[in-house]
Amino acid sequence: MGFGESAAAAAAAAAQVPAMFAFGDSLIDAGNNNFISSIAKSNYYPYGIDFRGGPSGRFTNGRTFVDMLGNLLGLPYAPAFADPNTKGNRMLRGVNYASAAAGILDETGRHYGDRYTLSRQVLNFETTLNQLRTMMGGTNLTQYLAKSIAVLVFGSNDYINNYLMPSFYSSSYTYTPLAFANLLLNRYATQILALHGLGLRKFVLVGIGPLGCIPNQRASGKAQPGRCVDNVNQILGSFNQGLRSLVTQLNNNHPGAIFVYGNAYGAFGDILNNPAAYGFSVIDRACCGIGRNQGQITCLPFAVPCSNRNQYMFWDAFHPTEAANAVLAWRAFNGPPSDSYPINVQQMALI
């Protein structure tokens, strides 16, 4: 798949887009939560065991989906917004605003402490824009933003750390699954349009993967051994289908922009159904964690992870391994419309 880090460095000279701006949750956090008062942190070993810089605040053993998508576009890793070193020229190839425990809804994940919610990430992007505006003229900034790519990875926490936690959040009593999905999509659309209003024109909106199959859910005792929690996967359907429909609607209403739906559910579903075809031998438990499916307690400091990490789909109770992230990145970049709709990221970069 050509994900060598030296190859990535060489490719950076020939970037296909000026920059990539990443908004999302722990699936793509590049260390923002290191700098805020949150218990959702991963800046300790064995997180980052396969990452060149060691533990960085990424919630996996190596690179995230967005790191690899950037590599494929010829871009360096987008630095974390909250890192005091993210200023000046370091911002020019893009910035990562993603924050572990963040959701589309402001209240999602509040039991973890501080996090940059979706609405806060949009405000943080405005802060970056104000700095970029002083560095480049207005016309240049407009063209730069129009050619850059925004990647948004949201929704998982609105389920795992809100709707599926009835002891902490009332949302599952208040909303049916369909009504909750519609609430999320309406809030999401508002913030996507805010980013469009700020000048971004290329959007990759990644759907939610099969959360009922993550080790945390398998360990809940709500499914038969060896099975995913089917009802959790079923309630995600209205969100993912709605997001795909939203993409169609946004494309129709904003002819000068392009919106793409990334089918994470389909990509991860394929791995779960045909693990050997992707080189995976373990799909039902975490590489690092404690308890049933190594998913009852997530990866603790200095825990000893599995040694054959490339054969595991899941790194910890909630997050994929670098190997699984690579599949998702490759399919978003290169895949057919069933993976990346209506066009893929490689095609988007050419527009």
Image (spheres, rainbow, N blue to C red):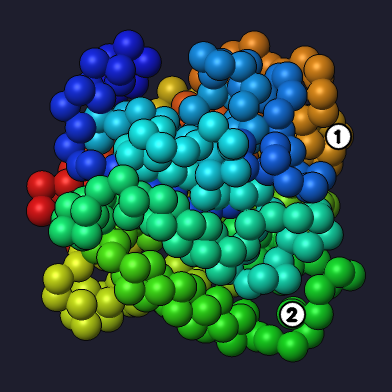
Q: Tell me if mark 2 has few (under 14), some (14-19) or many (20+) residues whose alpha carbon lies within 10 angstroms of its own.
A: some
Q: In front: 295, or 10? A: 10
| Residue found at x 48% / y 82% | 186
Q: Which residue bears the numbered disc 1?
A: 291
Q: In front: 229, or 102? A: 102
**Label 1 is placed on what type of residue?**
Gly
Quadrant hosting residue 258: bottom left
- Secondary element under disc 1, as helix, strand or loop, is loop
- Secondary element under disc 2, as helix, strand or loop, is helix
Q: Is residue 318 visible?
A: no
**Label 2 is placed on what type of residue?**
Ser
Q: Position of residue 295 (x, y in %)?
A: 77, 39
| Vertical order, 130 against 268 (above or below) | below
First in sequence, mark 1 or 2: give its number. Answer: 2
Extreme-right residue of the structure: 167
Tell me the tag on residue 211. Answer: none
Q: Which residue bears the numbered disc 2?
A: 171
On screen, residue 114 versus residue 176, left or right, reads right
Q: In front: 284, or 40? A: 40
| Residue found at x 34% / y 68% | 198
Q: Nearer the viewer, mark 1 or mark 2?
A: 2
* C-alpha separation, residue under disc 1 versus residue under disc 2: 28 Å
| Residue found at x 37% / y 15% | 5
Q: Position of residue 63 (x, y in %)?
A: 49, 28
Q: Position of residue 133 (x, y in %)?
A: 32, 54
Q: Position of residue 318 (x, y in %)?
A: 67, 43
Q: Is residue 240 visible?
A: yes
| Residue found at x 39% / y 56% | 129
